[in-house]
Amino acid sequence: MAINTLQEKFVHGLEGVYDAEHQFLKGMEEMLQNASDPKLKEMITNHMDQTRHQISNLEQVFSTLGQQAKRDMCDGAKGIKETSGADRVQDCAIAGAADKVEHYEIATYRCLIQDAQLMGQPEVVSLLQQNLEQEQSTSQLIENSLPDLLRKAMGPSDMQGQYSQSYPTT
């Protein structure tokens, strides 16, 4: 489908992020099963609740625009949510993948907000801004938890040489 107007561009992006949020929710269910760190599990559980709310916000955006909520396969989301790693680094891999997801969503919501502003849709901007703020907050939580997860994942061989450095905190 050729995109010829800002409205069509916006709806296409909206359908993509709607699909991405669904994919990420399914991915978080898998991450939750594989995570072992209690704090990471709690973050994932909380973000699953936020993602359900974000999906609801997107459905409201579709409704506000007089559109039926529709998913357009987001190939980018498919690759981002994949995680794997040895048992002792699995939590780090999960947190890293989760943060990549957040940054993808942050960039997407920023673009959609700009489009909605240009289209004169303040209600849509407000709903998308809520999602953006949640994504930014979640990203910060993940980034703050990474140093502890990395320290827990380090084995004896990692404690020698260049890998024994302290990890920066944000």
Image: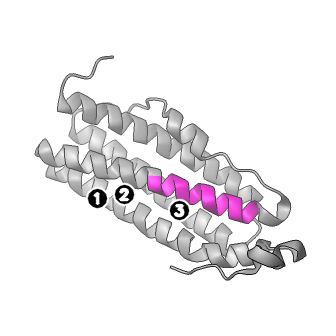
Residue topped by disc 3: 47
Compute the Cα span from label 1 to label 3.
16 Å
Examine the image and state in which quarter residue 148 appears. Answer: bottom right
> In the image, 4: left or right of 161?
left
Q: Nearer the viewer, residue 27 or 76?
A: 76
Count of number-bearing discs: 3
Compute the Cα span from label 3 to label 2.
11 Å
Q: Is residue 40 above or below residue 15?
A: below
Q: Residues within 10 Å of mark 2 (few under 14, many from 20)?
A: many
Comes first in the chain, label 3 or label 2:
3
Residue projecting furthest to the top = 1
**Main SS of residues in magenta:** helix
Residue topped by disc 1: 129
Compute the Cα span from label 2 to label 1.
5 Å
Residue 95 disc label: none
In the rendered image, residue 47, in percent from the top left (x then y), is placed at 53, 62
Q: Find out whether residue 95 is within the magenta segment.
A: yes
Q: Provide the secondary structure element on which disc 2 rests.
A: helix
| Residue 157, visible in the rendered structure | yes
| Residue 48, visible in the rendered structure | no
> In the image, 119: left or right of 158?
left
Q: Amino acid at mark 1?
A: Gln
Are circles 2 and 1 on residues that touch, CB within 8 Å? yes
Q: Find out whether residue 102 is within the magenta segment.
A: yes
What stretch of residues is rendered in magenta? 90-103
Q: Residue at x 41, y 65 (%)?
A: 136
Q: Residue at x 56, y 69 (%)?
A: 142
Q: Amino acid at mark 3?
A: His
Q: Provide the secondary structure element on which disc 3 rests.
A: helix
Residue topped by disc 2: 131
Q: Is residue 53 above or below residue 37?
A: above
